[in-house]
């Protein structure tokens, strides 16, 4: 907890293969010469402290196994402070997501926390309305907003996503999303393939991206360059 509030304390929301996703992050940071200390690796999130600031948008164009990158907020941060700290022209657009930062956290506890924090945001909305400011809270049925919603609703541009991390003892830690995975890039690659064959060539693109990132000099392999040729001996 002594590191909470550090300007270089980042969270990575991991995909379906958490172990592979964490290994990919480590490999990519090492390849870029970025010194990092792993603070936590859990079911849905990895927290990393770096010596230098990261560019999350650049990283997410490379990482196949990371859905979102953000920064942890100081331990003393409240929902009201976070909302009032947003200064945008026109209507503010915000979202709230809850993730498990440890094993043993129940889905019921996540849903309860989500309802509580959404309620606090709505209280802020009413207070801001009296001050002549408007706010819209974007919600879905899931406890975590998908990347598509953050982009199509312009949440990161017009306000922000408040992320809550729950531990198994009920403690909460707030963070704010800085960038999301370029899902449109993977979609265009998938739809733009010359042909499809249900019996072969079905390796998910994000998994393939992770495998390429793991084949880097830091792991004893040869660097994979744009336009290069990769041998897949088990195809």
Image (tube, rainbow, N blue to C red):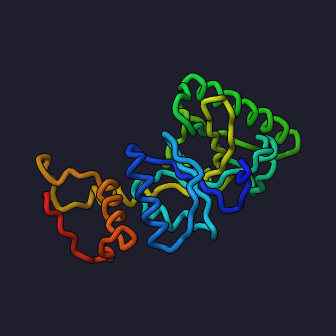
Residue at the spot 80% in from the left edge and 38% down from the top edge = 124
Where 99 sits versus 52, above or below?
above
Which quadrant of the structure image shows residue 109?
A: top right
Residue at the spot 17% in from the left edge and 63% down from the top edge = 232
Residue 27 visible: yes
Answer with left or right where residue 217 lies relative to residue 163: left
Out of 83 and 107, give the one closest to the viewer: 107
Residue lying furthest top: 108
Answer with left or right where residue 95 lies relative to residue 2: left
Where 227 sits versus 132, above or below?
below
User: Percent from the top left, x then y, of residue 140?
Assistant: 54, 34
User: Percent from the top left, x then y, of residue 15?
Assistant: 43, 46
Answer with left or right where residue 25 lies relative to residue 70: left
User: Percent from the top left, x then y, of residue 191?
Assistant: 27, 56
Residue lying furthest right: 131
> Number of callouts in the render?
0
Residue at the spot 41% in from the left edge and 59% down from the top edge = 24
User: Percent from the top left, x then y, of residue 5?
Assistant: 74, 54
Which quadrant of the structure image shows residue 226?
A: bottom left
Q: Quadrant of the C terminus?
A: bottom left
Out of 219 and 138, give the one closest to the viewer: 219
Which quadrant of the structure image shows residue 166?
A: top right
Residue at the spot 49% in from the left edge and 65% down from the top edge = 59
Residue 151 visible: no
């Amino acid at each position: 907890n002594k590191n909470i509030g550090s300007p270089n304390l980042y969270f990575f929301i991991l995909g379906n293969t958490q172990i592979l996703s964490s290994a990919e992050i480590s490999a990519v940071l090492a390849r870029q010469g970025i010194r990092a200390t792993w603070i936590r690796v859990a079911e849905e999130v990895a927290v990393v402290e770096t010596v230098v600031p990261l560019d999350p948008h650049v990283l997410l164009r490379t990482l196949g196994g990371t859905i979102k990158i953000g920064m942890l907020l100081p331990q003393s941060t409240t929902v009201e402070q976070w909302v009032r700290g947003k200064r945008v022209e026109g209507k503010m657009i915000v979202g709230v997501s809850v993730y498990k930062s440890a094993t043993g956290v129940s889905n019921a506890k996540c849903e309860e926390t989500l309802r509580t924090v959404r309620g606090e945001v709505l209280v802020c909305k009413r207070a801001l309305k009296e001050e002549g400011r408007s706010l819209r809270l974007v919600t879905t049925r899931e406890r975590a907003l998908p990347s598509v919603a953050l982009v199509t609703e312009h949440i990161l541009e017009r306000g922000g996503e408040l992320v809550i991390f729950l531990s198994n003892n009920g403690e909460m830690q707030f963070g704010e999303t800085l960038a999301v995975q370029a899902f449109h890039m993977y979609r265009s690659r998938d739809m733009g393939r010359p042909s499809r064959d249900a019996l072969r060539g079905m390796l998910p693109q994000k998994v393939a991206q992770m495998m390429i990132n793991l084949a880097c000099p830091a792991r004893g392999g040869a660097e994979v360059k744009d336009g290069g040729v990769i041998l897949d001996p088990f195809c």
